[in-house]
């Protein structure tokens, strides 16, 4: 079976953020999948991947929690691919996969907790974890996407922001940096490729993987606000009128600190922040509401209408 | 090595327009100094080696030893080096002022990240702001 066929039907792991602050990412991912004829089967009774609190209390407990998601997909749903659109979930599942392949202590802890919880122990290699970017890039591709575009994104200048966790640490992403066709950990481009295929003009954005201070959004807001403000201003300087995101934490951080920068530092940066799935959805002819633009914190509706989108 | 306050002034000021190459060299020097602060604060001595022609990249590598979260600014350092080259190889580019302005923004990001990380060590780690509490308690549950 080719990768293209393999990814057409995947176990969908939205994760906690996509049920809350990142709901518009959930909505737009599902809408784009439907429009592209791709099948998403939500992981049954999924749990938190262990991001945030659990990982801090005990990293191996996080490994177990991520492994349970993969175990359900593999052993209870007979799926061999899990697609996680959230960078945090994606990162944690990949990290769990790496740990279970390379660390016997992690294997023992996961086995013990899985037996205690009453489900099959996940074994390394049972599933492949992919990001939403891999999913669309490897099934539909740029040519396929371009052929399906109904409302070109032409006229939109986009800075693609991947955040610092999509490619880091490199050792948990063995499929990246494999030459042409694979994703790059130093200069990721899958989002650029897809949005360009939908007609957008990508700007040269040097902070595409820079830290936004996401982990300190609550604990140290001033650092996060300054980092986000610099990202917004750099995108603007690069000529962008939109920042495209592919992570709910990054997205929320950019939106919230854009507002906070204006309130606390008196610096307003007029740039729109949209999930790449929202942009692709509108390019495929979906209404702005259908891809949850009204659920974003920043208001992009007037801007998009002026560009003939949504 | 200038103080963090002095370096902040460099990063907050627009680069001097008259001599782009000198301004780029100043930004590169200031970026090296912020890395020197990080390395010194960790009890090490900043080296003088170069990687790929840049001391900046060697200093980043030195600063990331034993602290993978510091790699969150790896690409930022590489972009500074790249933009330095764009500015100093000016014959090929007509938009030299834009390139210099961009280099200033990237350098500022490095300053914000490292100076922030010197206050909150977990910056650059994913969602690990409570890690010191865990380490202090020595708590594990598995």
Image (cartoon, rainbow, N blue to C red):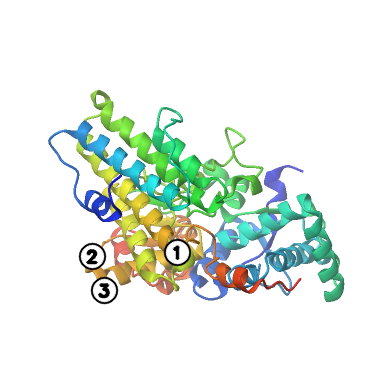
Q: Can I make out residue A227 in this image? A: yes
When the figure is inspected, residue B71 is found, relative to residue A245, above or below; the finding is above
Chain to which mark 2 belongs: A
SS of the residue under disc 1: loop
Residues marked 3 and 2 touching at CB (< 8 Å): no
- Can you tell which quarter of the image residue B5 is in? bottom left
- Judging depth in this view, the residue of A268 and A265 nearest the camera is A265
Q: Residue sitting at 50 percent across and 70 percent down? A: A22
Residue at the spot x=42%, y=56% of the render? A244
Is mark 1 in CB contact (under 8 Å) with mark 3? Answer: no
Q: Residue furthest left?
A: B18
Q: Nearer the viewer, residue A151 or B54?
A: B54
> Is B77 left, or right, of A84 in this rendering?
left
Circle 2 sits in a helix, a strand or a loop, which is it?
Answer: loop
- Please state the horizontal and vertical placement of residue A133, each as a whole percent of the image: 56, 52
Q: Left or right? Give the position of A159 relative to A98.
A: left
SS category of the residue bearing label 3: helix
Which chain letter goes with mark 3?
A
User: What is the distance, in whole Å, between disc 1 and disc 3 at their CAs?
Assistant: 23 Å
User: Residue A38: where, in percent of width, then height?
Assistant: 64, 57
Crowding near the residue tagged with mark 3, few <14, some 14–19, many ≥20 C-alpha atoms within 10 Å: few
Q: Nearer the viewer, mark 1 or mark 2?
A: 1
Foreground mark, 1 or 3? 1
Pointer 1 local density, CA inside 10 Å: few below 14, some 14–19, many at least 20: some
Q: Position of residue A92 (x, y in %)?
A: 64, 60
Same-chain status of marks 1 and 2: no
Residue holding disc 1: B120
Disc 1 to disc 2, C-alpha distance: 24 Å
User: Which residue does the numbered mark 3 point to in the structure image?
Assistant: A263
Q: Residue A267: which disc? A: 2
State whether residue A200 appears in this view: no
């Amino acid at each position: 079976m080719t990768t293209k066929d393999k990814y057409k039907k995947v176990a969908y792991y939205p994760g906690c953020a996509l049920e809350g602050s990142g709901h518009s990412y959930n909505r737009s991912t599902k809408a784009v999948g439907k429009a592209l004829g791709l099948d998403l089967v939500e992981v049954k009774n999924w749990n938190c991947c262990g991001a945030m609190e659990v990982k801090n209390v005990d990293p191996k407990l996080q490994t177990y929690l991520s492994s349970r998601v993969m175990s359900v997909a593999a052993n209870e749903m007979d799926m061999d691919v899990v697609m996680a659109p959230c960078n945090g979930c994606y990162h944690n599942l990949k990290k769990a996969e790496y740990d279970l392949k390379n660390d016997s202590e992690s294997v023992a802890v996961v086995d013990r907790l899985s037996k205690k919880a009453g489900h099959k122990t996940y074994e390394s290699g049972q599933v492949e974890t992919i990001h939403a970017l891999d999913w669309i890039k490897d099934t539909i591709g740029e040519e396929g996407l371009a052929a399906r575009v109904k409302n070109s994104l032409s006229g939109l200048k986009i800075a693609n922001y991947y955040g610092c966790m999509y490619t880091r640490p490199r050792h948990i992403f063995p499929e990246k940096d494999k030459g042409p066709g694979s994703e790059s950990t130093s200069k990721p481009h899958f989002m650029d490729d897809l949005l360009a295929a939908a007609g957008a003009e990508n700007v040269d954005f040097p902070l595409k993987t820079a830290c936004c201070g996401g982990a300190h959004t609550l604990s140290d807001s001033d650092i996060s606000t300054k980092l986000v403000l610099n990202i917004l201003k750099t995108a603007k300087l690069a000529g962008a009128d939109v920042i495209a995101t592919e992570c709910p934490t990054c997205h929320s951080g950019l939106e919230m600190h854009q507002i906070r920068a204006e309130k606390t530092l008196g610096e307003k940066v007029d740039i729109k922040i949209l999930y790449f799935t929202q942009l692709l959805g509108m390019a495929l002819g979906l209404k702005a509401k259908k891809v949850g633009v009204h659920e974003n914190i920043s208001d992009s509706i007037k801007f998009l209408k002026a560009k003939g989108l949504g | 090595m200038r103080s963090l306050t002095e370096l902040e002034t460099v990063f907050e000021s627009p680069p001097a327009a008259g001599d782009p190459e000198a301004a780029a060299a100043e930004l590169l020097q200031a970026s090296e100094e912020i890395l020197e602060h990080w390395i010194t604060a960790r009890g090490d001595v900043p080296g003088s080696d170069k990687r790929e022609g840049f001391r900046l990249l060697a200093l980043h590598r030195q600063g990331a030893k034993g602290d993978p979260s510091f790699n969150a600014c790896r690409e930022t350092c590489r972009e500074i080096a790249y933009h330095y080259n764009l500015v100093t190889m000016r014959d090929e580019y007509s938009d030299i002022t834009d390139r210099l302005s961009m280099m200033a923004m990237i350098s500022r990001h490095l300053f914000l990240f490292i100076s922030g990380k010197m206050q909150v060590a977990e910056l650059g780690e994913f969602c690990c702001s409570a890690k010191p509490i865990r380490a202090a308690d020595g708590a594990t549950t598995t």
